Image (cartoon, helix red, strand yellow):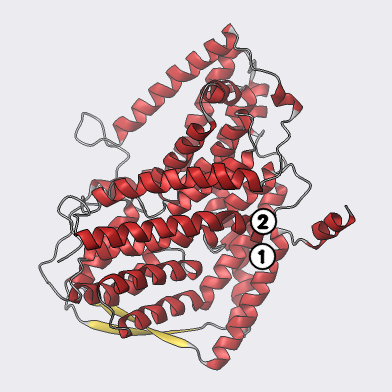
Amino acid sequence: MKVNKLKEKMTLHPIMTLIILIGVTIIISGILSILGVQSVQYKINPNSLEYSTELLKVDNLLSFSGLKYIFSSTVSNFVAFTPLSSLIIILIGIGVMEKSGFLKTALSLLTKKMKKNTVTFLIVLISVISSFMGDLCYVVMIPISALIFKYGKRNPLIGIIASFAGLTCGSGLSLYITSIDSSLISASILGAQMIDPTFRFATTSFLLIMVISILAISVAITMITERYTVNKLDKYEIPESDIEELNISRKDIRGLLFSGIAGFIYVVFFLYQITPGLPFSGKLLDYSQALYIDKLFSYNSFFSNGFVFVVTIFFVILGFFYGLGAKTIKNNQEFVDTLGHSVDGIGKTLVLILFASAFISIFRYTNIGEIIVASLAKLLNSLNFTGIPLIIMLFLVAALSTFFVPSSISKWTILAPMIIPTFMNAGITPQFTQVVFRFGECATMGLTPLMAYFVIYLSMLDKYNISEKRISLFKSLKYQIPYSLICGGILLIILIVWYVIGLPIGLNGSSIL
């Protein structure tokens, strides 16, 4: 007993770990700057199709300008940190659904007669395919998954871990072109035109390989969760308030009916406004873009900028109208109380997000990540590999690069000008090359605290942890290692099999030139 208490005292709180990582980053930037560590990034002029180079150097945080950046930008970076505002707004909507009783009634009914494995698989599958929402899916899926397990009388941590694994291991998997894929395709086309000026990219190029990969990853994550993760977590003691069986009354049925009708009307109206070509429709699209997916998800589109609020209003409508029907919300004071329900006691989460945003911004300032990616690209080109060894090497480069530069677009902007021509000279299509890169990212996306939405995962683990044992940052990473290794191995095997057999990866998309 004394040993366990001693270990608990020695376990670093995630906030302290982030503070240490910030200090280490500052010191390393100073050392690397003194040593003159640098690399070269190759760029392609889209007009002349000629290479230019940019020298990447380490920015020293121990210098006057570096220290000035730390002190002058920490507050502004925290305020502008997207996960902060997204999480708070989403929690408002979830609070209304939870406090009104909508979630307890709906989720209890949903999970009551459903097998545990089935619930886990559905959560994982939805998490994997929700990549079309971009990074915003993290603030929606992780809290909801925790509540689904809670009201299913299982440990909410299982839902958080499984959902995060699905979101990260499926971050590069999509049934259609997302806004991120659209940006990656632009870089791929530019690189391909260095070899073939007439090269074009079909938007359905990845469909077949993505369908197989999504199903394989969803099954794998479900099996890992039920056979490994569940056994690694402490035994879950169901809170007394959740032990009683839910008795569905007429008021509850009326509440579900009210919320269902109101929610349906809201969804139909919203879908109509993102559908072009109909009378008075498509008002929420960005018509400065050519592709529909860019009209929907471009950085300046209403959908990208307002999606979190759109989902929050949907949650508020469901909770509010359920409350009216079930008589759990009787006046405006009770409604206002529901709005603040989920954000009560959020102070520690805000401090966690503060230091997470500081760590991410400070590391980005140093350019260390970009230098590592550029150096790996140069290494891959110098090896003169072809075929399967070349595919494996890019997969590993993408996986390793993701630890230091989680952003897909930032990495591919550095890699594509060098990698795409190399693969084309080896007889491998740019489409398949981009798939290899995306699959490599999936293997390690859940293992880097530099990924902005990792802090959502970390904060939810802390919120729903009822054990006396603290969940440290490293322990939260440890939960994801089995998913990373197994899913990474599965994706690599799919790539190799696809290449060896020569199957088309999609409609108008192949692996071999």
Q: At 22% from the left edge and 66% from the top edge, which residue is drawn?
A: 430
Where does the image place residue 275, in percent across and percent down from the top left? 26, 35
Where does the image place residue 402, in percent across and percent down from the top left? 46, 66
Q: Which residue is outermost to the bottom?
A: 35
Q: At 66% from the left edge and 17% from the top edge, which residue is drawn?
A: 245
Horizontal placement of 60 versus 281: left or right? right
Label 1 packing within 10 angstroms: few (<14), some (14-19), many (20+): many
Horizontal placement of 415 versus 500: left or right? right
Q: Residue 67: in sight, yes or no?
A: no
Residue assigned mark 2:
352
Where does the image place residue 153, in percent across and percent down from the top left? 64, 29
Horizontal placement of 298 versus 112: left or right? left
Where does the image place residue 85, in percent across and percent down from the top left? 56, 48
Q: How many marks?
A: 2
Secondary structure category for the residue under label 2? helix
Q: Quadrant of the C terminus?
A: bottom left
Q: At 60% from the left edge and 42% from the top edge, which residue is drawn?
A: 158
Front in this rendered view, residue 450 or 511 = 511
Mark before the other along the chain sequence, 2 or 1 = 1
Proximity of marks 2 and 1: CB atoms separated by less than 8 Å: yes
Amino acid type at circle 1 is Leu
Q: Which mark is residue 18?
A: 1
